[in-house]
């Protein structure tokens, strides 16, 4: 009989390296300088679609942009690489969709369309107790069943007549005279092009901007540190009230100390929160923090993160069963996300770079098009409650040297810390909302997004319920 060896961090890396030893080196993507095809290519990419406003990425930022643009009656198209919308809100396995109603106040018509449709599905979709008879939140976020969320997003997109295509990952950008005019997508029918008058990059990783040759930033300026990745998961067959008491008494922290020797892949810390599933909780945790820097734009690093994280969550469940007492003696691993959640990768160098000081001081800007609220949270690395409600200037959505492109979500122009300050899903949706409105106005006025009068954008956002005089937290 073969010896059953426990996987620890040391032999995990040994196995991983040996597994990759025979894999040829993978070159990085080159930045696109051509229009439709690579130099010397004999194959012309067929046109998949031509539109006015093209939105890349169906996470919270892309959803916000799509709803906003569609409501204005624009000719648009939303492309998503997965088979569902929602981004980390959907594959986070029930983590709170945060900053959707800060202070319990409605944030915009765009946010409300998602909230109201999700709530219409009832208590099986939204955690009981999170909403009252008037659908008022106890807090700023929603704890939901992600399967209902995926349907709710499509319901809203269909209601505003927003065309969309799933399973369309972007693999290159189309650039003409320093202007982004579309993208190349990978489909089962081959590589195809989608052309547009204005493109919104809500990809999270700034894929469109990067492929188009925009200057991007990654990590901290001094050491390129990136926030850790996390594979969220659901534990079933537990008493939720007992789990809440377990967490309140901080016994999960004691468990980590006692169980780490046997289960060395345990994360540095983790949270257990209820979701709208009976006898189940969702787990968010420090993930790859102990691995060091893992880059979500590197295929090798993503392979390492996925391989590590799949084993890690099993060790967490086994540790809870063995060291968690009666609360977890019958606990089962019920589900995990389709991929690790990536908190930070590329950020585009824009006409203004939002800083940590802007976030902590609650800075205001004349060209404000959105605002951000919540904690300064660098993914289980630093959590600072001093962050104030602060403005997002329109310039932070505009790449420094490219026309025809707007940024939205976590890849807007910020420093490393400021990016963490605003990555909450409601905040990303707000910048998407602004980008969607600006894109439509740009098309209507037949000018580039950078040529818009910001007051026109602000006026349209105000019509959508956005208030620019929010008080600091």
Image (tube, helix red, strand yellow):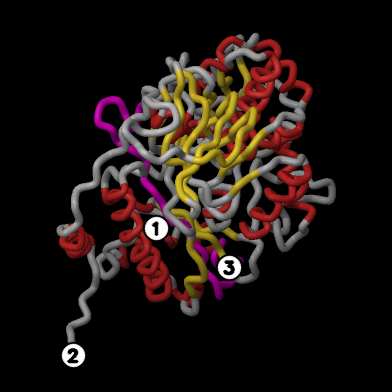
Instruction: Report the quarter where the N terminus lies.
Output: bottom left
Quarter residue 219 falls in: top left
Q: Whole-percent x and y of residue 32? A: 37, 29
Instruction: Mark yes or no: residue 360 visible.
Output: no
Give the answer, above or below, for where 125 lies relative to 165: below
- The residue identified by callout 2 is 1
* Left or right relative to 292: residue 205: right
SS for dot 2: loop
Q: Whole-percent x and y of residue 340? A: 42, 53
* 3D distance between C-alphas at marks 1 and 3: 20 Å
- For the residue pair 441 and 133, the one nearer the viewer reads as 441
Give the answer, above or below, for where 154 lies relative to 205: below
* Left or right relative to 461: residue 372: left
Q: Earlier in the sequence, mark 1 or mark 3?
A: 1
Question: Tags 2 and 3 in contact by the CB under 8 Å rule?
Answer: no
Question: Tags 1 and 3 in contact by the CB under 8 Å rule?
Answer: no
Q: Whole-percent x and y of residue 352? A: 47, 15
* Left or right relative to 338: residue 242: right
SS for dot 3: strand
Residue drawn 58% across and 25% down? 198
The residues colored magenta run 216-244
Circle 2: is it few (<14), some (14-19), or many (20+) Cα within 10 Å? few
Residue drawn 29% across and 67% down? 263
Q: Earlier in the sequence, mark 2 or mark 3?
A: 2
Residue drawn 19% across and 48% down? 25
Circle 1: is it few (<14), some (14-19), or many (20+) Cα within 10 Å? some
Q: Which mark is residue 253?
A: 1
Q: Nearer the viewer, mark 1 or mark 3?
A: 3
Q: Is residue 290 magenta?
A: no
Q: Whole-percent x and y of residue 80? A: 55, 45
Q: Nearer the viewer, mark 2 or mark 3?
A: 2
- The residue identified by callout 3 is 280
């Amino acid at each position: 009989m073969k010896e059953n060896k426990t996987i620890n961090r040391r032999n995990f890396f040994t196995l991983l390296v040996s597994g990759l030893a025979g894999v040829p080196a993978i070159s990085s993507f080159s930045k696109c300088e051509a229009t439709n095809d690579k130099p010397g290519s004999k194959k012309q990419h067929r046109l998949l679609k031509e539109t006015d406003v093209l939105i890349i990425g169906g996470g919270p930022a892309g959803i916000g942009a799509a709803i906003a643009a569609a409501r204005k009656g624009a000719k648009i198209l939303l492309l998503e690489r997965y088979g569902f919308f929602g981004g980390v809100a959907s594959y986070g396995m029930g983590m709170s969709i945060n900053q959707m109603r800060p202070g319990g106040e409605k944030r915009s018509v765009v946010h409300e369309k998602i909230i109201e449709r999700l709530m219409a599905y009832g208590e099986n979709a939204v955690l009981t107790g999170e909403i009252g008879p008037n659908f008022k939140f106890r807090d700023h976020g929603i704890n939901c069943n992600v399967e209902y969320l995926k349907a709710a997003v499509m319901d809203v997109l269909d209601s505003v007549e927003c065309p969309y295509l799933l399973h369309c990952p972007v693999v290159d950008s189309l650039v003409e005279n320093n202007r982004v005019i579309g993208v190349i997508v990978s489909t089962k029918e081959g590589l195809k092009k989608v052309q547009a008058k204005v493109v919104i990059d809500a990809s999270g990783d700034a894929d469109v901007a990067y492929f188009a040759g925009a200057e991007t930033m990654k990590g901290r300026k001094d050491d390129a540190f990136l926030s850790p990745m996390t594979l969220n998961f659901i534990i079933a067959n537990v008493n939720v009230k007992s789990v809440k008491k377990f967490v309140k008494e901080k016994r999960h922290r004691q468990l980590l100390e006692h169980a780490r020797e046997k289960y060395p892949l345990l994360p540095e810390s983790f949270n257990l929160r209820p979701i709208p599933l009976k006898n189940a909780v969702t787990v968010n945790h420090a993930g790859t923090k102990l691995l060091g820097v893992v880059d979500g734009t590197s295929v090798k690093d993503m392979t390492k993160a996925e391989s590590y994280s799949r084993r890690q969550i099993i060790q967490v469940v086994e540790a809870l069963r063995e060291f968690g007492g009666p609360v977890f003696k019958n606990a089962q691993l019920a589900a995990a996300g389709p991929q690790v959640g990536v908190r930070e990768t590329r950020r585009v160098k824009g006409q203004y770079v939002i800083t940590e000081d802007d976030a902590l001081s609650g800075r205001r800007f004349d060209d404000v098009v959105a605002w951000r609220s919540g904690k300064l949270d660098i993914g289980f690395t630093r959590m600072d409650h001093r962050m104030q409600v602060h403005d997002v200037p329109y310039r932070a959505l505009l790449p420094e040297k490219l026309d025809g492109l707007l940024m939205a979500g976590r890849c807007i122009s910020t420093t490393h810390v400021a990016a963490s300050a605003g990555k909450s899903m409601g905040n990303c949706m707000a910048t998407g909302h602004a980008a969607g409105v600006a894109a439509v106005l740009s098309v209507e006025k037949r000018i580039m997004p950078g040529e818009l009068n910001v007051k026109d954008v602000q006026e349209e956002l105000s019509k959508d319920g956005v208030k620019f005089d929010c008080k600091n937290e």
